[in-house]
Image (cartoon, rainbow, N blue to C red):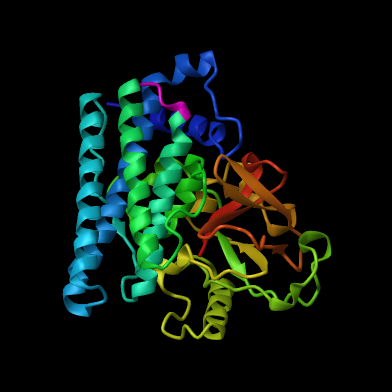
C-alpha cells in the first residue's frame, strides 16, 4: 500500500510540474525514476476523489428533485445518465488502485447548494469543467500506459457532460477550440469549497494535493478608471460573489452578505456553501481579496503562497486551452475582464506572466 508520505511527495511533484502553459509538462529522467508508480497512484487517488464528489452531487440533485421539482423528467433522466457514468469512472479508478496495492478511496461528506435550479446547473458545470481540466493537466505526468488510456477515455465523457449542462444553461455547446488544463493544486482549489469532511487523508483531495489560497470577489465601483491594471471604461463596476462559507473571516462574511444583498440574493446571506466557488456574473472589472484562513492557506503554510496578498498580484490569468491570457492587476481598481473572454471561464492571480507563479485561485466565472 502506498503510504500518505509517499503520496504527498508525489503530489508535490505534481503540483509543481503541471500547469496550463503552452508547452506540455514533462518528467525528467530522475523524476521518472523516483516518482514512477507512486505518482500514478496519487493521480488515480485524486481522480477518484473528484469522481466521487461529482457522483454525490448528481445523486443529491436527483433525490431532492422528487420534492422540489426543479427539473423535468427528461432533465432528470439526463442527470441520471451523467451520474451513472461518474459512478462507473469512480469504480474503474478504484479497481486500478486496488490492483496496484493502493488504498480504498471513500466518499467524503460534501456541501452542495441544491435549492436553486440555476445554482445547481452552474455548480454542475464547474465540476465538469474542473474534471476535464484535471485529467488534461495530469496527463503528461502519468507513467502507466493503461492509466493514461483510462484517463483519456474518461476525459471526453466529462466534456459530453459539460455540453449537456451548457444546453440546459442556454450557453454555447462548444465554447472554445481547446480545453483548459489545470495543475492538481489548481483543481484542488476548485473543489475545496465542496468538501466538508473526509474519513481519512487518502480520501481527501485537499490532503492529497494541497490547494492554493481561495479568491473572493470584492465590489469594485470602477470609478478609479482602468489605470495600468485595467485600461479604460471602468464605470460598470464588478459583479461580486459571496465570500466562502465557513472560514472566510468575519469581515469577509459581512462583505459577502452586503454584496449578496446588492445582487438581490437575499436568501443566501453569504452563507451558502455553493458560493465558495462563487459562479460569477460577467463584469468589466474584477477585484479580489484572498481568504485569510481555511484549508487552502493552512495546507500552503510552508509555501510562499501562504503569506500572499492581493498586493503581490501583478496579473489576472484567464486559462484558455493550453495557454493563458494575462491582464494587468492593480489595486484598487482590479483588472479588466477581456470582453471576448469565452464563458464560462476561470481566473487566478499571479505574480508573473506565468501560471506557475499563481498566488490564489482559480475561481470560476459564469
In-front residue for pair 333/162: 162
Range of magenta residues: 140-144
Observer able to see residue 118: yes
Which residue does the image show at 54% across and 44% down from the upper left?
321
Q: In the figure, 203 relative to 262: above or below?
A: above
Which residue shows up at 37% across the image and 54% down it? 162
What's the residue at 38%, 33% (across, down)? 43
User: Which percent across, then down, holds residue 82?
Assistant: 25, 54
The reply to whether residue 108 is in sight is no
Decide if residue 111 is on the left or right side of residue 174.
Answer: left
Instruction: Give yes or no for residue 142 being in the magenta stretch.
Output: yes
In the image, residue 218 lies at what x, y percent?
63, 71
- Which residue appears at 63% of the width and 42% of the height? 355
Left or right of 293, for residue 47: left
Foreground: 157 or 104? 157
Q: Is residue 157 above or below residue 256?
A: above
> Whole-percent x and y of residue 41?
34, 29
| Left or right: where 304 falls relative to 295 | right
Q: Is residue 111 left or right of residue 262?
A: left
Q: Main secondary structure of the magenta part?
A: loop
Is 278 drawn above or below residue 45 in the view shown?
A: below
Q: Is residue 345 magenta?
A: no
Amino acid at each position: 500500500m502506498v503510504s500518505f508520505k509517499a503520496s504527498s511527495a508525489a503530489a508535490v511533484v505534481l503540483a509543481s510540474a503541471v500547469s496550463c502553459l503552452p508547452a506540455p509538462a514533462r518528467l525528467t529522467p530522475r523524476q521518472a525514476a523516483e516518482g514512477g508508480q507512486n505518482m500514478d497512484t496519487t493521480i488515480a487517488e485524486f481522480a477518484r476523489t473528484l469522481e466521487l464528489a461529482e457522483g454525490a452531487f448528481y445523486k443529491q440533485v436527483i433525490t431532492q428533485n422528487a420534492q422540489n421539482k426543479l427539473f423535468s423528467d427528461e432533465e432528470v433522466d439526463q442527470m441520471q445518465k451523467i451520474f451513472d457514468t461518474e459512478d462507473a469512472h469512480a469504480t474503474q479508478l478504484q479497481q486500478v488502485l486496488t490492483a496496484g496495492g493502493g488504498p480504498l478511496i471513500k466518499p467524503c461528506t460534501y456541501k452542495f447548494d441544491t435549492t436553486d435550479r440555476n445554482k445547481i446547473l452552474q455548480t454542475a458545470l464547474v465540476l465538469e469543467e474542473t474534471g476535464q481540466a484535471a485529467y488534461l493537466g495530469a496527463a503528461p505526468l502519468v507513467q502507466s500506459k493503461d492509466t493514461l488510456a483510462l484517463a483519456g477515455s474518461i476525459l471526453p465523457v466529462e466534456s459530453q457532460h459539460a455540453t449537456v449542462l451548457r444546453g440546459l444553461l442556454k450557453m454555447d455547446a462548444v465554447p472554445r477550440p481547446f480545453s483548459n488544463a489545470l495543475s492538481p493544486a489548481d483543481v484542488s482549489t476548485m473543489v475545496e469549497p465542496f468538501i466538508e469532511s473526509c474519513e481519512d487523508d487518502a480520501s481527501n483531495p485537499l490532503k492529497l494535493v494541497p490547494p492554493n489560497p481561495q479568491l473572493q470577489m470584492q465590489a469594485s465601483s470602477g470609478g478609479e478608471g482602468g489605470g495600468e491594471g485595467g485600461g479604460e471604461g471602468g464605470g460598470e463596476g464588478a459583479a461580486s460573489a459571496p465570500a466562502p462559507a465557513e472560514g472566510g473571516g468575519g469581515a469577509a462574511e459581512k462583505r459577502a452578505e452586503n454584496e449578496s444583498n446588492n445582487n438581490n440574493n437575499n436568501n443566501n446571506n453569504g452563507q451558502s456553501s455553493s458560493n465558495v466557488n462563487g459562479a460569477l456574473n460577467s463584469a468589466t472589472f474584477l477585484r479580489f481579496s484572498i481568504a485569510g484562513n481555511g484549508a487552502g492557506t493552512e495546507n500552503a503554510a510552508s509555501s510562499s503562497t501562504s503569506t500572499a496578498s492581493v498586493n503581490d498580484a501583478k496579473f489576472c490569468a484567464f486559462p484558455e486551452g493550453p495557454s493563458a491570457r494575462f491582464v494587468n492587476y492593480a489595486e484598487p481598481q482590479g483588472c479588466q475582464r477581456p470582453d471576448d473572454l469565452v464563458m464560462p471561464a476561470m481566473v487566478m492571480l499571479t505574480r508573473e506572466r506565468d501560471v506557475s507563479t499563481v498566488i490564489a485561485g482559480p475561481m470560476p466565472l459564469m
